[in-house]
Image (cartoon, grey):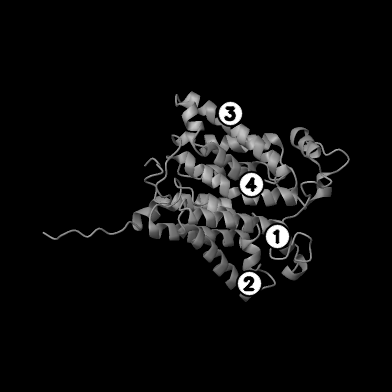
């Protein structure tokens, strides 16, 4: 079934798809602003590259499919896909990898199924997972807090993005493991959580720097709910499930399992809960279904983080639950009672 704003169970009636997409982009601005202030120019440059790539790639696919280019570019869905993909990538990512991710997101995540409204998977997460699996080394370098006006300037960022050169600096010299990667690597080395938490990657509540970005995303997500752009069930189910399961594991063995705050304020849980999993096309469409869909994502996030081969797991969790959406919707349709004859 094709998606329309007026009929979507995730979104309340609006004037157009573009109005909804613009509100989503506006809600992301606090998180992007905090991101740039803490980690420098890289995220802003990545967003420019991602958005420009999305416009060009989307236009080419629309032209190839004989669809009105101007009309569909104006709905901002390609821009939203690019922005969500870029926010999942490290702030220092080569331009070609961003462009490649956007290409896979729009081609294999969207147009191969017929375009907007027909995609069974979240396009941004399709692009992200493909580049993550294909180029794990390039996506393993997360810089420490550089600051927008820090030693690593806009010129340095441009030089690395375009030419892969850092001048006299090295990527190892300015990068550090994320909290989730530090936990994963530390456990594999036989360290306890208390020993791992001595690393600089840990902040006051979760991942240093990223905890404040997550809180900014939370503020934007709550605004989307207040504006009735998204429904509350999926974010609430994801956050509640991650909190509950991680709390149980933490209480059972706090030396081997991270606390709920670390889970919630590290990685992409908050971004995923409010901005990714709520995609109106690929998520569940019933009231009960949205709760089951969100709970399933939460379970998978904790399972992948605790025992899987990838530190975060949000993208994989969303895509795996996208597969289950038809079954969830089938079994959670409201019952209609008719008159007996």
For the residue labelled by badge 4, is the local secondary structure a helix, a strand or a loop?
helix
Crowd band around label 1 with a 10 angstrom C-alpha radius: few (<14), some (14–19), many (20+): many
Query: What's the distance in space between the residues labelled 1 and 2, CA to CA?
Result: 17 Å
Report the front residue among 265 and 195. 265
For the residue labelled by badge 1, is the local secondary structure a helix, a strand or a loop?
loop
Q: Quadrant of the C terminus?
A: bottom left
Q: Going from the N terminus, do you reach mark 1 or mark 3 first?
A: 3
Circles 4 and 1, Cβ within 8 Å, touching? The answer is: no
Q: Going from the N terminus, do you reach mark 4 or mark 1 first?
A: 4
Query: What's the distance in space between the residues labelled 3 and 2, CA to CA?
Result: 47 Å
| Residue assigned mark 4 | 87
In the figure, residue 55 lies in which quadrant? top right
Q: Is residue 180 left or right of residue 156?
A: left
The disc placed on residue 250 is 2
Q: Is residue 290 left or right of residue 258?
A: left
Q: Residue at x 75, y 70 (%)?
A: 194
**3 or 2: mark nearer the eye:** 3
Estimate the x, y position of residue 327 in percent, counting from the top left: 38, 53
Q: Residue at x 68, y 34 (%)?
A: 96
In the figure, residue 101 lies in which quadrant? top right
Q: Going from the N terminus, do you reach mark 3 or mark 2 first?
A: 3
């Amino acid at each position: 079934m094709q998606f329309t704003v007026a009929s979507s169970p995730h979104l309340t009636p609006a004037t157009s798809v573009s109005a909804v997409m613009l509100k989503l982009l506006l809600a992301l601005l606090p998180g992007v602003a905090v991101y740039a202030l803490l980690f420098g120019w890289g995220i802003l440059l990545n967003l420019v590259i991602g958005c420009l790539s999305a416009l060009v790639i989307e236009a080419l696919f629309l032209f190839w499919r004989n669809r009105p280019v101007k009309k569909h570019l104006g709905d901002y869905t390609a821009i939203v896909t690019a922005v969500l993909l870029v926010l999942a990538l490290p702030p220092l990512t080569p331009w070609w990898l961003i462009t490649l991710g956007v290409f896979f997101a729009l081609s294999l995540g969207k147009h191969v199924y017929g375009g907007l409204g027909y995609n069974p998977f979240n396009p941004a997460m399709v692009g992200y997972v493909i580049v993550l699996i294909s180029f794990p080394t390039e996506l393993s370098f997360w810089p420490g807090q550089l600051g927008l006006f820090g030693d690593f300037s806009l010129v340095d960022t441009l030089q690395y993005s375009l030419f892969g050169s850092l001048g006299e600096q090295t990527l190892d010299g300015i990068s550090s493991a994320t909290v989730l990667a530090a936990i994963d690597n530390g456990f594999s080395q036989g360290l306890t959580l208390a020993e791992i938490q001595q690393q600089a990657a840990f902040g006051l509540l979760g991942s240093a720097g990223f905890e404040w970005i997550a809180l900014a995303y939370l503020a934007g997500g709550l605004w989307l709910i207040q504006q009735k752009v998204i429904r509350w069930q999926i974010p609430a189910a994801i956050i509640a499930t991650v909190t509950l399961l991680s709390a149980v594991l933490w209480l059972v063995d706090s030396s081997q399992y991270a606390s709920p705050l670390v889970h919630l304020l590290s990685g992409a849980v908050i971004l995923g809960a409010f901005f990714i999993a709520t995609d109106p096309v690929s998520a569940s469409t019933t009231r009960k279904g949205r709760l089951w869909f969100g709970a399933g994502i939460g379970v998978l996030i904790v399972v992948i983080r605790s025992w899987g081969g990838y530190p975060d797991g949000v993208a994989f969790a969303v895509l795996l639950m996208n597969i289950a959406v038809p079954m969830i919707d089938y079994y959670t349709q409201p019952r209609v009672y008719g008159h007996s004859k």
